[in-house]
Amino acid sequence: MWRGKTPLIVAVTVLVHWILWLAYTNNVGFREMIAGAVAAVISAVGAAVFAEQGNICFRFRRRDLIQAVYLPWYALTGTWEVLQSLAKQLFTQAGAPSLIAAVAFDVGDDDPICAGRRALAVSYTTITPNFVVLGIVYDQRLLLYHQILPGEVLTMTRHLGARP
């Protein structure tokens, strides 16, 4: 994808990341400009390396994309769970529970449809406030995740391949 255009794309990426750095820090002092330039170069080189490593193709099935319908509800319930955990952390001796767990996951094959389903499972689940997907262990067919307030695996994630 990037072949032949890599230097131009990296240069534009550096410039955009540097401008974003300065905008987020709201500071155009000398030190901030240097730190922003270094961070922008590192992020652009990282993006280029990953882009050059291979051709990853995704194809999404309609039924997998439709799982996004759950996201507004999970945003509300996940926010409530995070607030409950915050209250427990602040006002109880034991603090807030949290959980790092693994659940069986149908990783599928190396075809674009399965890659798309895995990408949606990771993205959709991590979008919710109470879940962070740490990764997929292909050999053991597991989805690793962290929950701030332990609970059930999301229905949406089950529809995308998790098997609790």
Image (tube, rainbow, N blue to C red):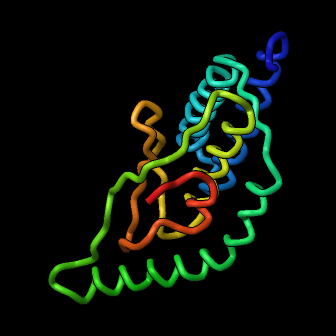
In-front residue for pair 8/26: 8
Seen at 54% across and 38% down, the residue is 35
Seen at 34% across and 87% down, the residue is 87
The image position of residue 58, as x and y in percent, is 76, 36
Q: Quadrant of the N terminus?
A: top right
> Does 29 appear above or below 37?
below
User: Where is residue 11, by image quadrant?
Assistant: top right
Question: Left or right: 6 with respect to 101?
Answer: right
**Disc count in the image?**
0
The image position of residue 138, as x and y in percent, is 47, 33
Question: Left or right: 44 with respect to 130?
Answer: right
User: Where is residue 60, by image quadrant?
Assistant: top right
Seen at 48% across and 55% down, the residue is 163
Question: Left or right: 105 with respect to 87?
Answer: right
In-front residue for pair 24/58: 58
Seen at 73% across and 54% down, the residue is 64
> Does 108 appear above or below 77?
above
> Does 102 appear above or below 18?
below
Question: Left or right: 90 with respect to 65?
Answer: left
The image position of residue 110, as x and y in percent, is 64, 27
Q: Quadrant of the C terminus?
A: bottom left
The single residue placed furthest to the top in the displayed view is 4
The image position of residue 26, as x and y in percent, is 64, 57
In-front residue for pair 144/104: 104
> Does 1 appear above or below 36?
above
